[in-house]
């Protein structure tokens, strides 16, 4: 056996993968819903309009200045928004009927949305206070929760497909 | 309900706080001269032209109430920041999609303000800035030539 | 001790006896017995526990129904807030439907997303501006035109402030300060002006006579402003200052042709035998020479020079 072959055998196994650097975009799938055979999938107005209708038929869910020309902190804002969304869906479990709307004005973060009236008003006040307190502690800026309540799930349904 | 009481309470706290703050600050001298601003130009940026339009209307109205001349204009075209990505995950280079972010611009120019007016107006406008709108305020101050630069 | 234990035995035995009688007696008194309970291993119908009925919370009717017509809207909606349909007494609709009407204001997330100006209605703006007016001062009446501003306040200092929606109020671009002034206000003449222009370089605009100094190398606006003023002071005094090596500037270092310093003057004085001032038509000649030397040789300058020479030597002009 020659020396180079021996070297190859004795070398530690390496794991590597070739990366494609072009970005993928799930444009034809993300934010779209398939028609069900019985046409009974409820959609809200937000869900009924696919992403290319943003700024035409529907607005953004996050409203801030970081994506403007010359805006600051775009990556931090995006990550904080994801964190807020995850926190809200977990804390307000199965209560939010709309998307979570995050508006940033100066250093204030205002979280809006439509919730179901399935828990008592007392619990809801507790949840509001809990959310505001914890989020403002983590994000180090004042957080306000501005909610609208509906009696039933079916109130926000725009159409069935 | 209790909102008014709460509000009064908060305002009491803030007044106490501000009193404490001001007592630490150095006293403003009596005969301190005010600054003079020739022009104060606001550049407003936003994704939504309708919001910008409403805000410009608000700012010019506020300027009119405070007796400041103003004029406003907007860029005819927004700045498009485009980004092309593949439609598919891996290959098929022929099929691409474009994302774009648009930045709409509006400008307001206030003319001939004193320092206190400029501070008041700018703070009032900035406090009422809606979400998703960025503001850049450029002030041109008028100053006399310093004594040591006058020819001997 | 013994009697006590016996007593216990007795009572226990009696209780057991009673129990056995009850269990095995041929039911002498069946009416008094309880109903025989069935062991129910599977849950069969008819055994349901009554469910607690969920009490629905009392929902107040929307606030808009109780609002008086002449209410003060500024108190209802005092500050920026997301849209709430129960507070806004307007029949708003928002959204797109291919057929039919747009979705109403209740349970409409689109209305909550868009920034609203409900707290900035015209009467509210007017009221707030009235309250703010006491902090404002009027513009001095004597400074009504730009020319007067320029005459009394020749220095223009420009800087920017930024307002983003982020937790920090710092913006690195806010440090930049630019100072503008007309070169004429410094009152520099001749050599000093030439030196100033050389030091300033491209920051001077010839068409408008304006010098612009932009500073951005310090981290704060105040520092940059001080630096700009320092630069202007240094430039001014440096250009007034005459260094010893500046006196050594010879004819070869001149950037423009000056007739008085050159051989053309001495030769014409030698030719006429008197001072240059006393020669007739010498101005035209000197100007022609200066133009010829500075602008270069072209049809116009050459013809001018020829005419001037003919005139100074009293020769008839060339017929054209």
Image: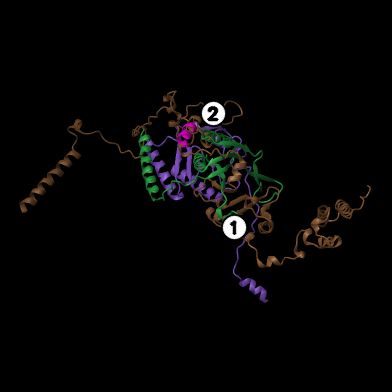
Chain colours: A purple, B green, C brown
Q: Is residue A88 visible?
A: yes
Residue C91 drawn above or below residue B134: above
Q: Which mark is residue C93?
A: 2
Seen from the viewer's position, the closer of residues C111 and C229 is C229
Of pointers 1 and 2, the one earlier in the residue sequence: 2
Does B60 sit left or right of A90 as displayed?
right
- At a point 36% along the width and 43% down the height, the residue shown is B13
Mark 2 element type: loop
* Residue C236 location, quadrant: bottom right
Seen from the viewer's position, the closer of residues C246 and A134 is C246
Label 1 marks a residue whose chain is: C
Q: Main secondary structure of the magenta part?
A: helix
Mark 1 surroundings within 10 Å by alpha-carbon count, few (fewer than 14), some (14 through 19), many (20 or more): few
Q: Position of residue B21 (x, y in %)?
A: 39, 48
Q: Nearer the viewer, mark 1 or mark 2?
A: 1
Does C59 sit left or right of A27 as displayed?
left
Seen from the viewer's position, the closer of residues A137 and B88 is A137
Asked if both marks, 1 and 2, belong to the same chain, the answer given is yes
Q: Which mark is residue C231?
A: 1
- At a point 89% along the width and 55% down the height, the residue shown is C313
Q: Which residues are magenta?
A: C125-133
Q: Position of residue C146 (x, y in %)?
A: 61, 41
Seen from the viewer's position, the closer of residues C278 and B113 is C278
Mark 1 element type: helix
Q: Position of residue B2 (x, y in %)?
A: 35, 34
Residue C37 drawn above or below residue C157: above
Marks 1 and 2 sit apart, C-alpha to C-alpha, by 60 Å
- At a point 91% along the width and 53% down the height, the residue shown is C315
Which quadrant of the rendered structure holds the C terminus of chain A? top right
Q: Is residue A120 visible?
A: no
Label 2 marks a residue whose chain is: C
Q: Position of residue C12 (x, y in %)?
A: 13, 46
């Amino acid at each position: 056996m020659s020396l180079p072959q021996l070297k190859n055998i004795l070398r530690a196994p390496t794991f590597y993968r070739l990366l494609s650097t072009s970005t993928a975009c799930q444009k034809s799938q993300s934010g779209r819903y398939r028609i069900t055979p019985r046409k009974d999938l409820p959609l809200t107005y937000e869900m009924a309009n696919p992403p290319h209708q943003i700024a035409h038929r529907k607005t953004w869910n996050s409203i801030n200045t970081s994506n403007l020309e010359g805006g600051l902190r775009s990556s931090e804002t995006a990550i904080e928004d994801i964190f807020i969304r995850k926190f809200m869906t977990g804390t307000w479990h199965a209560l939010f009927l709309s998307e979570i709307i995050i508006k940033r004005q100066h250093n204030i973060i205002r979280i809006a949305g439509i919730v179901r009236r399935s828990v008592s008003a007392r619990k809801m006040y507790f949840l509001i206070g809990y959310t505001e307190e914890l989020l403002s502690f983590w994000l180090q800026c004042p957080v306000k929760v501005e909610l609208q309540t509906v009696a039933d799930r079916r109130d926000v349904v725009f159409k069935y497909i | 309900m209790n909102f008014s009481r709460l509000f009064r309470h908060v305002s009491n706290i803030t007044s106490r706080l501000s009193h404490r703050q001001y007592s630490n600050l150095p006293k403003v001298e009596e005969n301190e001269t005010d600054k003079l601003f020739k022009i104060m130009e606001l550049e407003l940026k936003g994704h939504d032209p309708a919001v910008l339009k409403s805000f410009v209307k608000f700012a010019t109205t506020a300027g009119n109430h405070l007796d400041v001349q103003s004029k406003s204009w907007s860029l005819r075209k927004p700045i498009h920041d485009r980004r092309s990505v593949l439609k598919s995950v891996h290959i098929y280079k022929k099929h691409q999609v474009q994302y774009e972010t648009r930045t709409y611009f509006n400008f307001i120019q206030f003319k001939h303000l004193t320092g206190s007016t400029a501070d008041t107006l700018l703070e009032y406008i900035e406090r009422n800035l809606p979400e998703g709108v960025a503001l850049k305020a450029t002030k041109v101050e008028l100053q006399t030539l310093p004594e040591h630069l006058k020819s001997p | 001790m013994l009697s006590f234990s016996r007593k216990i035995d007795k009572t226990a035995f009696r209780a057991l006896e009673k129990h056995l009688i009850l269990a095995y007696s041929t039911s002498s008194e069946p009416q008094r017995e309880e109903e025989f309970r069935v062991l129910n291993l599977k849950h069969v119908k008819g055994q349901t526990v009554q469910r607690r009925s969920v009490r629905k919370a009392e929902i107040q009717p929307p606030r808009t129904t109780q609002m008086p017509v002449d209410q003060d809207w500024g108190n209802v909606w005092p500050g920026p807030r997301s849209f709430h349909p129960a507070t806004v007494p307007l029949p708003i609709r928002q959204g797109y439907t291919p057929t039919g009407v747009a979705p109403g204001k209740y349970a409409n997330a689109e209305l909550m997303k868009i920034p609203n100006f409900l707290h900035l209605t015209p009467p509210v703006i007017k009221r707030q501006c009235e309250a703010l007016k006491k902090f404002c001062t009027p513009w001095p009446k004597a400074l009504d035109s730009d020319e007067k501003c320029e005459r009394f306040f020749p220095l223009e200092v420009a800087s920017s402030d930024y307002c983003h929606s982020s937790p920090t109020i710092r913006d690195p671009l806010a440090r930049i300060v630019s100072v503008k002034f007309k070169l004429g206000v410094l009152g520099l003449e001749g050599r000093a002006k030439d030196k100033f222009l050389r030091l300033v370089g491209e920051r001077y605009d010839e068409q408008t006579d304006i010098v612009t100094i932009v500073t951005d190398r310090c981290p704060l606006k105040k520092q940059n402003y001080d630096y700009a003023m320092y630069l202007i002071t240094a430039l001014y005094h440096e250009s007034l200052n005459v260094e010893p090596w500046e006196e050594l500037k010879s004819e070869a270092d001149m950037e423009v042709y000056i007739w008085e310093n050159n051989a053309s003057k001495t030769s014409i004085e030698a030719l006429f035998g008197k001072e240059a001032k006393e020669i007739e038509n010498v101005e035209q000649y000197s100007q022609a020479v200066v133009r010829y030397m500075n602008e270069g040789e072209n049809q116009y300058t050459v013809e001018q020079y020829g005419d001037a020479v003919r005139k100074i030597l009293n020769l008839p002009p060339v017929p054209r």
